[in-house]
Amino acid sequence: KDGKEGKLPADKVVEQKAKTTADKTDPKKPTEKTEVADKTNLTDTEKAAVKKAIEDANKDDQGKSTLPAGTEITVGNDGTATITYPDKSTDTIKGSDLTEEKAKTQADKRPLQNEVDKKDDTKASDKYKNADKDKKEAYDKALDDAKKVLEDPKATQDDVNKAKKALVEAEKALNGKTTSDTDNTGGNDGYRPGHDGRDIFDRLFRRHEYVPTFPVYVTVPEKTETGVKVHDTLWYVFRINDFQYEVVRNGVVTKRLMDVTPVLQNGRTMLPLRYVAEALQADVKWDAKTRTATFTKDGLTASIQIDSDEIVLSNGKTVKMDSKPLNINDRILVSVTNVANVFGLTNGNTKDKADQDIEWEQQDKSATIYIRR
């Protein structure tokens, strides 16, 4: 203050704060996120999986941890990991960097669809046509409700089960009596004792005498073949969140039911591989022990292990997939690009104006597989 220099006592000197282990350590994040059912509420098993993923990410080439000995990792309900070092300093990794939600498990709508498919036979039956009005209305309502559940991509398994139960019960409750042919002798409308069971109307309602008839056969000459070939077209249409896919042959559309729907996952169109394979007339086999699906077509076999990101071909080649397969209701779903890789097809979208084997249409979110245009 007065221009003179002086020295502070040792006990007055401000020491620089020593760096903590957290200051000197930069833990690595896993390259792949852990799939969880609910990112806001992880189970203990999911937390353990996140912890292991962090531990594995922080190992050297010899498999030894690069984190200081004694480091502890804890994972919170939201997936956030806290790394506590021996000196009690900490690092955190956000849950959003560690976890991603699994594709929602879809309800199995096949049993409900099977009940709905009986509607034409039911409505043509006497038990429906001759049923009380309230019974018919109850069946019609249960049928309409069932159709709405089938069309709802967000329907839960409980919704499906309730709709099926209501439809089955409504069908059983139909009380129409079966219409039978009436004997034109008049029955016993006016039974008279001592007349062998005949009544006073028998003579009025006697059957006409039977006159035999014989079939007439007409032979039509066969047409002469002109040799003109019919252009045979065939393609299959799969839509996102739709349990039915379309078979379009020569302009005639036939719908077929699946037990899982195509989905969008991280911007990729994921198709159920079994149904695609069946559409392409490929042989399909599933090995539950190894969790491996094999698809054979034209002598070439493609194998996909559900936990792998590779397609192994029987010709010795291996194709790296752009994303891992999904497993929904024990069905393997793979991206359109990977479907093309498995079966040797080309793929693109309708906007590129080029004819591809698999075409994606953004407007209605459909993937069409062309066999013959």
Image (cartoon, rainbow, N blue to C red):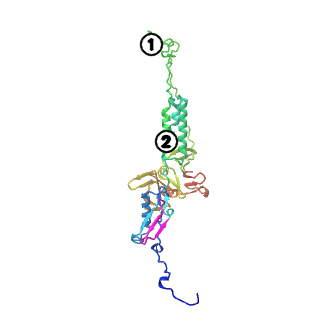
> Disc 2 marks which residue?
162
Q: Position of residue 42 (x, y in %)?
A: 46, 57
Q: Give percent across and percent down for residue 1.
A: 58, 87
Q: What is the secondary structure assignment of the residue under circle 2?
A: helix
Crowding near the residue tagged with mark 1, few <14, some 14–19, many ≥20 C-alpha atoms within 10 Å: few
Q: In the image, is residue 117 part of the stretch drawn in magenta?
A: no
Q: Residues within 10 Å of mark 2 (few under 14, many from 20)?
A: some
Q: Nearer the viewer, residue 248 or 331?
A: 331
Kind of residue at badge 1: Gly
Of marks 2 and 1, which one's residue comes earlier in the chain? 2
Camera-side residue: 36 or 225? 36
Residue 73, compared with residue 303, is above or below; it is below
Question: Residue most toward the front?
Answer: 2
Badge 1 is on which residue?
Answer: 197
Question: Residue at 51% across / 39% down in the picture?
Answer: 116
Residue type for callout 2:
Lys
Toward the bottom, the furthest residue is 4
- Which quadrant of the view contains residue 315? bottom left
Real-space Cα distance between discs 2 and 1?
A: 53 Å
**Residue 305 seen in the figure:** no
What x and y, as percent, mark residue 242? Answer: 54, 48
Name which residue lies at 49% across and 19% down.
183
User: Would residue 157 be visible to someone looking at this image?
Assistant: yes
- The single residue placed furthest to the left in the displayed view is 289
Question: Which residue lies at the image location 53% right of the left edge and 13% below the top edge?
Answer: 204
Residue at the image position 51 percent from the left and 53 percent from the top? 271
Residue 257 screen position, x and y as percent = 50, 45
Give the magenta-colored segment's residue range: 77-93
